[in-house]
Image (cartoon, rainbow, N blue to C red):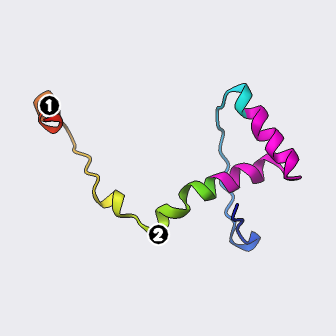
């Protein structure tokens, strides 16, 4: 996993909800890596979005309309 330079870190407090077995796996990962669960979650978040900053083209393709009728939705599926 790619870790940030501590000088570049931004505190971003969040509350997440996971299943008990997921929490256990995260705790085991942290124990095996001899680090905190906060650092494991931070590394997972960094890895998850690292490619997004390089190619943000998917955001340009997304259009969110102000409103949409049922007919409009059906036309999109055709």
Location of the N terminus by quadrant is bottom right
Name the residue rendered at 47%, 69% in the picture.
54
| Disc 1 secondary structure class | helix
Q: Does the magenta stretch include residue 31?
A: yes
Coordinates of residue 73 in the picture (x, y in percent): 17, 33
Q: Residue beneath label 1, please?
A: 74
Residue at the (69%, 66%) spot, across then down? 9
Q: Give the range drawn in magenta.
A: 23-44
Q: Is the magenta stretch mostly helix, strand or loop?
A: helix
Identify residue for label 2.
Answer: 54
Q: Looking at the picture, does residue 69 appear above or below residue 28?
A: above
Q: What element carries label 2?
A: helix
Which residue lies at the image location 62% right of the left edge and 58% below the top edge?
46
The image position of residue 12, as x and y in percent, is 65, 54
Q: Is residue 26 left or right of residue 57?
A: right
> x%, y% of residue 43?
69, 56
How many marks the image carries: the answer is 2
Q: Residues within 10 Å of mark 1 (few under 14, many from 20)?
A: few
Q: In this view, does 35 lie to the left or right of 6?
A: right
């Amino acid at each position: 996993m790619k870790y940030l330079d501590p000088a570049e870190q931004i505190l971003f407090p969040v509350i997440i909800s996971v299943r008990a077995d997921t929490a256990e796996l995260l705790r085991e990962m942290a124990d095996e890596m001899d680090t905190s669960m906060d650092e494991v979650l931070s590394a997972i978040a960094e890895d998850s979005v690292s490619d997004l900053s390089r190619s943000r083209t998917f955001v340009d393709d997304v259009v969110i309309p102000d409103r949409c009728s049922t007919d409009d939705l059906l036309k999109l599926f055709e």
